[in-house]
Image (cartoon, helix red, strand yellow):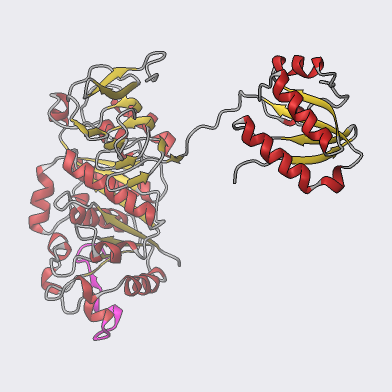
Amino acid sequence: MVGSVITITSGKGGVGKTTATANIAAALASTGKKAVCIDADIGLRNLDVVLGLENRIVYDLVDVVEGRCRLRQAMIRDKRLPELYLIPAAQTRDKSAVSPSDMVKLANELREEHDYILIDSPAGIERGFRNSIAPADRVIIITNPEVSAVRDADRIIGLVEAEEKGPAQLIINRLNAGMVERGDMLAAEDVLELLAIELIGVVPEDEEVIVGTNRGTPVALDSKSKAGQAFRNIGQRIQGETVPFMDLGQESGFFDRISKLMRPGG
Amino acid sequence: MPPQVQIKGIREGLLITVPDGEWPNVQDDLLVEVDKQADFLRGAKLILDVENHILNAATLGKLRDMISERELSLWAVLSHSPTTEQTAQALGLATRIHQAHPEESSRPLETNLDGDEGILVRRTMRSGHILEHPGHITVIGDVNPGAEIIAGGDVVVWGRLRGVVHAGAEGDTKSVICALDLAPTQLRIADQISIPPQDRGETRPEIALIREGQVVAEPWSPRSWER
């Protein structure tokens, strides 16, 4: 098996990288794919919390890299999905404990037994970002419909291109259709017009996401959640399926325009 | 090194070409060269191409005499000037040879322009991208917020301009910035800085330039680039 390494990054913090990583991994694993997620945010780990696996941590990423344990020992199996694993970040070290080549080596080992290796990148453009990008086969940029988040996403897209890891794909997270309708929030098409990369998902703002994060249960496993549905759609698109974009209750014809905008970008 | 007196053989004889400049100096140079090459020139028919020099009868007659003194014969004088041609004809010199002005056919027409140095970039310029060049800069693609262009000359953006552009960065106040959609974060031309208004109405090609000491943006119109 030759798994695919997908890095999820954003530049700006707090836009939903960790939530998206957990949910996409859960969505992939719930369709029977073997998925492993790596928390690359050494020193500020929280992917384990979002997945509800915090209390099972014995070894972490730095332990693997420094040879204190075997890779297998640091992989925590999810309590709900047997095909989902987590490699947690170390809490007591910093980003320099791991190098980009360590990440490439680790990813190559994981590729042999998993369909998807998802890397949750830390915010910023420093070492942690470089570590996360190094082994990537594809890069998913996550942004919010806010000017500052979009600006950082644009910068990150440029850096991903410079590392020859592009073209990146885009998730617009926490879109509030009501605010867009009132003209108080950037519409998805405004974001796409600027970033000009392929859109792979639009996730609506949904209180269930916060509830799920606090409980350690990704919303992708909640069949009633709209955000959960959006993440499951992203999971399918990652697997190469064509899934229409959900109607988020915005002005009519909106998604026709999105699909038009998507075409030039591939 | 300035152009020199040149002597070369053509079918009709030896063609002597002279550089531009004050005629007395040119004539001195010519005679020095003729003396230097006296052996080579002896017995040959000399054709003198004076190009744009305008020579009156006295000057040309004097030159002919000085050449004769060296036991050489001036056969023809070629010139761009009708006055000089008439003078030469009056002195009994030919003004046309069969292969008139051998260089003329290879001289390019004056419609070839030189232009200025610049660079072209075809890509989306994203936040953090910086593009600097001492000449002109053309971008085919969008210039996003956070991207920066610094040019010694003009800047042309065939796309949406939303970043920062500095044209005429070394002080050229005649520099211009044009874009299909001019919505920059900030514009600078020479030492003038301008923060464009937020609300611009419809999108249209615009050109920014300095008028009365201020950077102004104007809708593109024929001849608006003429400064």
Quarter of the view holding residue A91: bottom left
Residue nearest the viewer, comparing A52 with A198: A198
Q: Which residues are magenta?
A: A66-82
Picture coordinates of residue A22, whole percent (x, y): 22, 57
B49 over A4 or under it: above or below: above
Image height check: is B168 above or below A40?
A: above
- The reply to whether residue A243 is in sight is yes
Closest to the observer: B136 or A169?
Answer: B136
Where is A67 relative to A108, above or below?
below
Q: Is residue A83 visible?
A: no
Asked if residue A78 lies in the magenta stretch, the reply is: yes
The part of the image, by quadrant, that contains residue B75 is top right
Give whichever of A253, B7 is nearer the camera: B7
Query: What residue lies at 22% left-to-right and 73% top-to-bottom?
Result: A96
Quarter the N terminus of chain A occupies? bottom left
Looking at the image, residue B199 sits to the left or right of residue A253; the answer is: left
Q: Residue furthest bottom?
A: A68
State the residue in front, B132 or A68.
B132
Q: In the picture, residue B145 is in which quadrant? A: top left
The count of marks equals 0
- Give the quarter of the figure containing the C terminus of chain A: top left
Coordinates of residue B119 in the picture (x, y in percent): 45, 41
Determine the main secondary structure of the stretch shown in magenta.
Answer: loop
Q: Which residue is pictured at 89% across the width and 42% down the height? A: B42
* Percent of width and height locating residue B199: 18, 21
Residue B129 is a magenta residue: no
User: Which residue is pictured at 13% across the width and 24% down the height?
Assistant: A182
- Left or right of B164? Residue A137 is right
Q: Position of residue B100 (x, y in %)?
A: 82, 25
